[in-house]
């Protein structure tokens, strides 16, 4: 490429454009209420196009395309009408020779046939969705036992050395990122569990793990580094069937609308992940595989937390069963670091929800049947997890308690017993009438997914919720036989 002087002639060999070009235009008030048709061959002209036209003319009821060129005496303009309910008017010719009525009608007939093909192509494109992208999964291969223990020991030692030492903290952050990206989730998990008696060191380790997820950095092939922030839209929905699908390619259409609603600078990146994460998916790998999301998306691929083919087969089999369920999930999106201040996102959250909800509904419905749905405002990743889980836990327990209270004469007649259930990574809350042993209803209260799930925080949140409702709570400890 080279610059041309302003007074230079236009150079180059351009390709001829299509004979018929259709498009929109904007004015001071925004998008104009009509489309435009441009005829590029002789006689070249441009005119306006509108739909929903019911002008009567001889032959309108005929099968196939029927048309007429009429003169509107009131407006002093020539119009073309057809039985496709389309009208062309305001003809502006750019050749010295204008066509006669018959020639213009033939050109417009051909334009309308082309317009029909264009609309059909739009419908087929929308039905097909965006072109499929390559699916990539992060490494998940466990290390050999001896190597795993060495890596666990190294993390433990670096976490201890990082307490109160900024340089040690930087080294720990790099080691944690490498451990998480290596794919053996037991390394980080065992290291943080081994530091249970050393809260400062454990907190340093956990903090680095959370930062690796929330603030990913990607080194590109050219050596440049791009820093991101991970955000999410919490998304809750119901299903009458079993199974939950997780890959929704049409979520890509959310990117521009969400970036505009949140006023993300034009040249800054905002990428929406077409991979949705449910509570079970996050718990399965302790949120650790989220560190793979940014490099996979930066490479132009979609992240696959599970094997797509086997996962799809499992989902389709489960969908044939009747298993009503309520699902809490999150739609992650990456934003270039610094492009979306948190206070700005809070201020524009309602606008973002208004534009996002219909697009999310369309994207989900294209791949999976669901019932009711609720979308929450966009938030940074860990805040989205905690606030979404908190709202979902309260909603499920609140509905269950309210239904039981309506039958028993009020919330003051109830008491709750909670038992931790490892298989659901949460508490099973039994509700019963005071003085009776038999449970009348129950609801799960799940621990918020995390690289280091905090069971005590979940218990405290449950206790606070029931205290506000005036329902006594006790804990049942499972006995091993």
Image: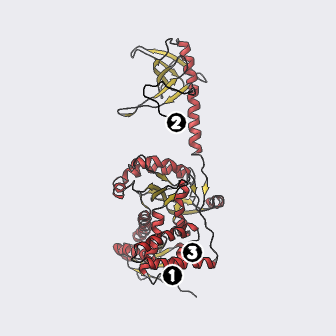
Question: Which numbered marker is on residue 194?
Answer: 1
Q: Position of residue 221 (x, y in %)?
A: 55, 54
Name the element at disc 2: loop
Q: CA distance from mark 3 to mark 1?
A: 12 Å
Name the element at disc 1: helix
Q: Is residue 394 visible?
A: yes
Instruction: Choose the circle earlier in sequence order: 3 or 1.
Output: 3
Q: CA distance from mark 2 to mark 3?
A: 53 Å
Looking at the picture, the colour scheme in use is: secondary structure
Instruction: Choose the circle earlier in sequence order: 1 or 2.
Output: 2
Within 10 Å of the Cα at label 2, are there few (<14), some (14-19), or many (20+) other Cα atoms? few
Q: Nearer the viewer, residue 212 or 86?
A: 212
For marks 2 and 3, give the one nearer the viewer. 2
In which image quadrant can residue 400 be found?
Answer: bottom left
Work out which residue is located at the far bottom of the displayed protein and give it.
481
Within 10 Å of the Cα at label 3, are there few (<14), some (14-19), or many (20+) other Cα atoms? some
For marks 1 and 2, give the one nearer the viewer. 2
Q: Are marks 1 and 2 in contact (CB under 8 Å)?
A: no
Q: Which residue is mark 2?
A: 1
Q: CA distance from mark 1 to mark 2?
A: 60 Å
Q: Is 186 on the left or on the right of 395, as rendered?
A: right
Q: Position of residue 277 (x, y in %)?
A: 52, 61
Q: Please report the residue visible at 46 percent of the width from the left and 21 percent of the height from the top.
A: 89
Quadrant containing the C terminus in the rendered view:
bottom right
Residue 324 vertical placement versus 122 (above, below): below
Q: Which residue is mark 3?
A: 186
Instruction: Choose the circle earlier in sequence order: 2 or 3.
Output: 2
Q: Nearer the viewer, residue 303 or 53?
A: 303
Q: Is residue 55 visible?
A: no
Q: Nearer the viewer, residue 264 or 74?
A: 264
Q: Position of residue 284 (x, y in %)?
A: 56, 69
């Amino acid at each position: 490429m080279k610059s041309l002087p302003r007074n230079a002639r236009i150079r180059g060999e351009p390709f001829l454009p299509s004979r018929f070009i259709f498009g929109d235009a904007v004015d001071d008030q925004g998008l104009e209420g009509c489309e435009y048709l441009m005829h590029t061959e002789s006689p070249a002209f441009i005119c306006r196009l509108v739909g929903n036209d019911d002008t009567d003319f001889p032959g309108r009821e005929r099968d196939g395309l029927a048309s007429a060129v009429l003169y509107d005496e009131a407006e002093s303009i020539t119009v073309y009408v057809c039985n496709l309910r389309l009208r062309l008017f305001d003809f502006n010719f750019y050749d010295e020779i204008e066509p006669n009525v018959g020639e213009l009608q033939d050109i417009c007939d051909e334009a309308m046939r082309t317009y029909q093909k264009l609309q059909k192509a739009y419908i087929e494109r929308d039905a097909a969705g965006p072109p499929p992208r390559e699916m990539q999964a992060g490494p998940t291969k466990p290390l050999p036992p001896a190597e795993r223990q060495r890596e666990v020991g190294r993390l433990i030692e670096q976490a201890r050395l990082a307490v109160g030492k900024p340089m040690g903290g930087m080294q720990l952050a790099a080691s944690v990122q490498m451990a998480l990206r290596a794919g053996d989730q037991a390394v980080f998990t065992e290291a943080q569990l081994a530091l249970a008696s050393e809260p400062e060191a454990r907190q340093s380790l956990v903090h680095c793990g959370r930062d690796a997820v929330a603030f990913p950095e990607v080194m590109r092939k050219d050596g440049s580094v791009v820093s991101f922030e991970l955000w999410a839209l919490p998304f809750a929905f119901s299903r009458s069937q079993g199974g939950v699908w997780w890959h929704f390619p049409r979520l890509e259409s959310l990117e521009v609308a969400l970036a505009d609603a949140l006023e993300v600078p034009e040249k800054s990146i905002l990428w929406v992940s077409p991979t949705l994460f449910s509570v079970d998916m996050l718990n399965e790998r302790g949120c650790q595989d989220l560190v793979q999301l940014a490099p996979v998306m930066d490479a132009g691929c979609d992240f696959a937390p599970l094997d797509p083919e086997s996962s799809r087969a499992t989902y389709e089999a489960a969908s044939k069963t009747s298993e009503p369920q309520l699902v809490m999930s999150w739609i992650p999106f990456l934003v270039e670091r610094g492009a979306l201040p948190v206070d700005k996102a809070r201020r524009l959250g309602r606008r973002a929800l208004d534009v996002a909800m219909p697009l999310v509904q369309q994207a989900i419905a294209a791949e999976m049947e669901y019932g009711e749905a609720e979308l929450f405002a966009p938030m940074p990743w860990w805040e989205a997890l905690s606030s979404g889980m908190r709202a979902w836990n309260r909603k499920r327990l609140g509905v269950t308690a309210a239904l039981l209270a309506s039958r028993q004469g009020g919330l003051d007649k109830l008491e709750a017993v909670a038992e931790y259930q490892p298989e659901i990574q949460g508490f099973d809350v039994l509700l019963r009438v005071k003085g009776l042993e038999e449970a009348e209803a129950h609801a799960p209260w799940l621990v918020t997914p995390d690289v280091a799930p905090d069971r005590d925080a979940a218990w405290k949140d449950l206790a606070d919720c029931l205290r506000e409702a005036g329902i006594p709570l006790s804990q049942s400890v499972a006995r091993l036989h």
